[in-house]
């Protein structure tokens, strides 16, 4: 999960040392879980992504799309709720080949 490790580097560059060190507390997760996330051994959950998005002053959807966060955990229902808040919805279009 190289993209998750790249996101960790991005986080370290964007957050202050103090904010980065307090991530387990602010995310409400254990240090063990945070270490798995930072090493790219575990994928982010939607609540964690939303909190990180606030810290980075970004839209959670932007982090999901740009860094492929949450692909293993975010359900279609969660994605629909996230999109609905922006006036969007999931759409599955059939590709027609010529």
Image: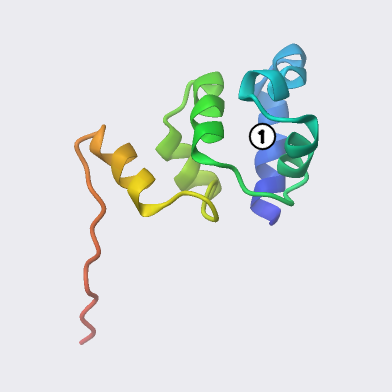
Tell me, what colour scheme is on the image?
rainbow
Image quadrant in which the N terminus is located:
bottom right
Please say if 31 is above or below 97.
above
Left/right placement of residue 59 relative to residue 7 reads left
Kindly identify the residue that appears in the image at 55 percent across and 46 percent down: 69
For label 1, the crowd category at 10 Å Cα-Cα, with few meaning under 14, some 14 to 19 and many 20 or more, is few
Question: What is the quadrant of residue 45 in the picture?
Answer: top right
Front residue of this view, candidates 78 and 7: 78
In x, y percent, where is residue 33? 74, 38
Left/right placement of residue 56 relative to residue 15 reads left
Q: Residue at label 1?
A: 10
Query: In this view, which residue lies farthest toward the bottom?
Result: 98
Front residue of this view, candidates 85 and 33: 33
Front residue of this view, candidates 34 and 14: 34
Query: In this view, which residue lies farthest toward the top?
Result: 18
In x, y percent, where is residue 2? 70, 55
In x, y percent, where is residue 91? 23, 58
Please say if 57 is above or below 42.
above
Q: Secondary structure at mark 1?
A: helix
Image quadrant in which the C terminus is located:
bottom left
Please say if 98 is above or below 47.
below
Kindly identify the residue that appears in the image at 36 percent across and 53 percent down: 76
- How many discs mark residues in the rendered view? 1
Kindly identify the residue that appears in the image at 67 percent across and 30 percent down: 11
Kindly identify the residue that appears in the image at 53 percent across and 47 percent down: 70
Left/right placement of residue 33 relative to residue 96 reads right
């Amino acid at each position: 999960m190289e993209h998750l490790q790249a996101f960790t580097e991005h986080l370290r560059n964007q957050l202050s040392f103090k904010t980065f060190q307090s991530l387990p507390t602010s995310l409400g997760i254990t240090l063990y879980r945070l270490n798995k996330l930072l090493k790219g051994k575990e994928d982010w959950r939607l609540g964690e992504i939303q909190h990180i998005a606030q810290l980075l002053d970004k839209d959670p959807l932007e982090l999901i799309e740009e860094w492929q966060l949450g692909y293993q955990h975010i359900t279609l229902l969660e994605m629909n709720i996230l999109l609905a808040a922006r006036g969007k919805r999931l759409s599955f279009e059939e590709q027609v080949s010529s």
